Image (cartoon, rainbow, N blue to C red):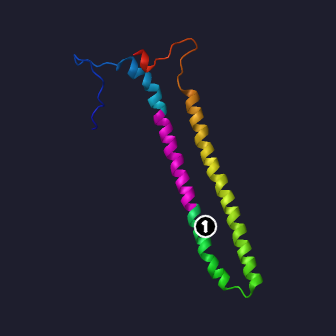
Amino acid sequence: MPAEPTRPTNVSGEVTSGGPAFESWGPMLSGMQAWTRQLGTVQTAWQREWWGFVEQRLRKDAALPGQLSCCKGPDEALRVCADFYRQAVDDYQRELLTMTRLGADLTLAHSEDVARTDAPEPGERALHVGNL
């Protein structure tokens, strides 16, 4: 059975809330945990997407010499090269769109997290390090 997390105590050994400084950091820390989880999820999706794309492009790049060696003349070789580069541009454009969408998902999730954080009410004094 896992040990219970330690709690802040005062000099007498009594459990305390950690004081106003600790309490003011609580909402921010919980928000950071959620954002870090989201960042990790998106980072993993980015890496999977990118490495899948790189693998796909390397396969197509490696196949080009074989396709060129099968050509019966310069016109056919020119067509193979044109098709190859046209496909490469299409692939890179598609990948840029996919990666941009993943980044937008992260930005949207983060902005929603920021909007949900507890901010001081208008006129309420925020706790700053200089006020401690």
Q: Residue furthest right?
A: 75
Give the residue displayed 54% in from the left and 51% down from the top.
Answer: 45
Query: Which region is colored magenta?
Result: 32-52
What residue do we see at 57% from left, 63% from top? 54
Give how far across and how far down residue 49 sits, in percent.
57, 56
- Identify whether 34 is placed above or below 64: above
Q: Which picture quadrant has residue 17?
A: top left
Pick the front one: 116 or 3: 116
Total of numbered circles in the picture?
A: 1
Quarter in which the C terminus is drawn: top left
Residue 97 drawn in magenta: no
- Percent x, y for residue 128? 45, 19
In percent of the image, x 29 and y 29: which residue is there? Answer: 6
> In the picture, which quadrant includes the N terminus?
top left
- Give the overall secondary structure of the magenta segment: helix
- Residue type at the position of mark 1: Arg
Residue furthest to the top? 123
Residue at 47% across / 34% down in the picture?
Answer: 32
Q: Which residue is mark 1?
A: 57
* Residue 88 drawn at (x, y percent): 67, 66
Mark 1: give few (<14), some (14-19) or many (20+) Cα within 10 Å. some
- In the image, residue 61 above or below residue 96: below
State the image quarter where residue 3 is shown. top left
Say above or below: 112 vs 82: above
Q: Secondary structure at mark 1?
A: helix
**Residue 45 painted magenta:** yes
Q: Nearer the viewer, residue 12 or 123?
A: 123
Q: Residue furthest bottom?
A: 72
